[in-house]
Image (cartoon, rainbow, N blue to C red):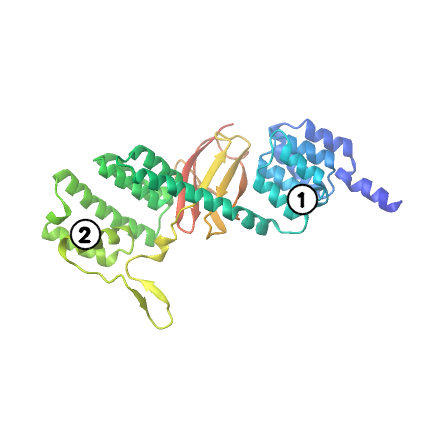
């Protein structure tokens, strides 16, 4: 009898009807308060309350519904709840369903997330790169389409490829405008900022040649010397471009061989490993946008990474929020109730690769 009484007192906080009613009558403005209440009563929420919570998609973002379900593994073990989450009017994404299945039987959230999302992320990344290759292989390149896909891929390297498309079209203004905002957009510092300065020097040279109608084999002695300096000092994009021009047009030779120094391992004198890590597969979106009470960040990481950082800045560039995300794919909900209305910029940084976009907060 004592066990039965104890169970009834813990189930849904001991007041089943009130908890169910609170969920069914909830408004979006009460999301955070209700979320805290439901998590406080977990893992003792009933099937009825969990189903009602799953149906409240106008109140809870998917990540919060997922969070509440994962906090109640006993009910998750029942096929009834998993089936409901899959077949309801607004079902949870398949990757969340798969993770909940594993969470119900003891697998940690992080492990399940990494295992389930690695393949999904790989396919998305491959599809984006396939589209870019397809456009480049066409007889006449559609530069607008190419720029759209490069923007979807995101990151400094993608932006520099976009800049090259502008130069190919002779659009110097757009090329320079995009190049000039890169430091602020990706919050470059130290090594990355030095490499960006080298990149801008190389870009200025390209613009001069374009406007003067000259080719790379028509450089002045001063410009050749400038390339020699870039080739020696830059280990990024500018250095690679300078070495390529000097080798092809002026007979220079640079050793790009792998070198071994004691136990240091293999190193390349031509390409910096930090730039190689700015690879593809970093994806971030936010909803709703504009946001009021909360904003959900949906993220995907490359196969080789398991964590990233999202930085949010106001219109003046002041960072107002920084948080880490883990797992190959997932969501993070940002509480915007105390945030001033206005335009904000969010940057997703993963091992040097970055994506930046805009979020509007209203009240």
Q: Give percent across and percent down for residue 12.
A: 75, 38
Q: Give percent across and percent down for residue 312.
A: 45, 40
The total of numbered circles placed on residues is 2
Compare residues 218 and 189 and report the one nearer the observer: 218
Residue 324 visible in the picture: no
**Quick one: SS at disc 2?**
helix
- Identify residue for label 1: 71
Mark 1 or mark 2, whichever is nearer to me:
2
Q: Give percent across and percent down for residue 347.
A: 42, 42
Q: Residue at x 49, y 33 (%)?
A: 340
Asked where in the image residue 146 lies, by quadrant, the reply is: top left
216 shown above or below 88: below
Q: How crowded is mark 2: few (under 14 residues within 10 Å), some or many (20 or more)?
A: some
232 shown above or below 294: below
Compare residues 210 and 115 and report the one nearer the observer: 115
Q: Residue at x 33, y 46 (%)?
A: 157
Give yes or no for contact between labels 1 and 2 (Cβ–Cβ under 8 Å): no
Q: Which residue is drawn at 21% across and 55% down?
A: 243
Disc 1 from disc 2: Cα separation:
59 Å
Q: How crowded is mark 1: few (under 14 residues within 10 Å), some or many (20 or more)?
A: many
- Identify residue for label 2: 245
């Amino acid at each position: 009898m004592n066990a039965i009484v104890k169970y009834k007192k813990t189930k849904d906080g001991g007041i089943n009807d009130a908890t169910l009613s609170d969920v069914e009558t909830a408004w979006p403005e009460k999301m955070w308060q209700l979320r805290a209440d439901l998590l406080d009563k977990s893992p003792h929420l009933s099937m009825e309350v969990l189903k009602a919570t799953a149906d409240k998609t106008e109140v809870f973002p998917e990540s919060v519904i997922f969070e509440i379900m994962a906090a109640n593994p006993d009910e998750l073990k029942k096929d009834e709840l998993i089936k409901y989450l899959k077949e309801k009017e607004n079902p949870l994404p398949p990757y969340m369903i798969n993770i909940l299945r594993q969470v119900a039987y003891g697998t940690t959230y992080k492990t399940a997330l990494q295992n389930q999302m690695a393949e999904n992320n790989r396919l998305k990344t491959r599809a984006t790169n396939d589209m870019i290759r397809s456009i480049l292989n066409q007889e006449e390149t559609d530069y607008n389409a190419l720029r759209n896909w490069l923007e979807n891929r995101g990151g400094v390297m993608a932006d520099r490829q976009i800049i090259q498309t502008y130069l190919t079209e002779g659009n110097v203004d757009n090329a320079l405008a995009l190049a000039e905002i890169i430091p602020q957009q990706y919050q470059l510092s130290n090594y990355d900022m030095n490499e960006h300065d080298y990149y801008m020097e190389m870009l200025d040279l390209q613009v001069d040649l374009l406007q003067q109608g000259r080719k790379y084999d028509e450089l002045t002695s001063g410009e050749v010397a400038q390339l020699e300096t870039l080739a020696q000092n830059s280990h990024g994009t500018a250095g690679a471009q300078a070495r390529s021009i000097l080798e092809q047009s002026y007979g220079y030779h640079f050793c790009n061989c792998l070198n071994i120094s004691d136990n240091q391992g293999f190193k390349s004198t031509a390409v910096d490993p930090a730039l190689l890590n700015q690879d593809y597969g970093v994806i971030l979106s936010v909803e709703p946008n504009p946001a009021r009470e909360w904003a959900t960040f949906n993220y995907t990481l490359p196969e080789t990474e398991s964590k990233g950082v999202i930085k949010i800045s106001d219109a003046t560039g002041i960072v107002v929020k920084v948080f880490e995300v883990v797992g190959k794919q997932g969501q993070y909900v940002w509480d915007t109730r105390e945030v001033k209305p206005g335009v904000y910029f969010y940057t997703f940084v993963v091992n040097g690769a970055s994506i930046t976009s805009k979020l509007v907060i209203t009240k």
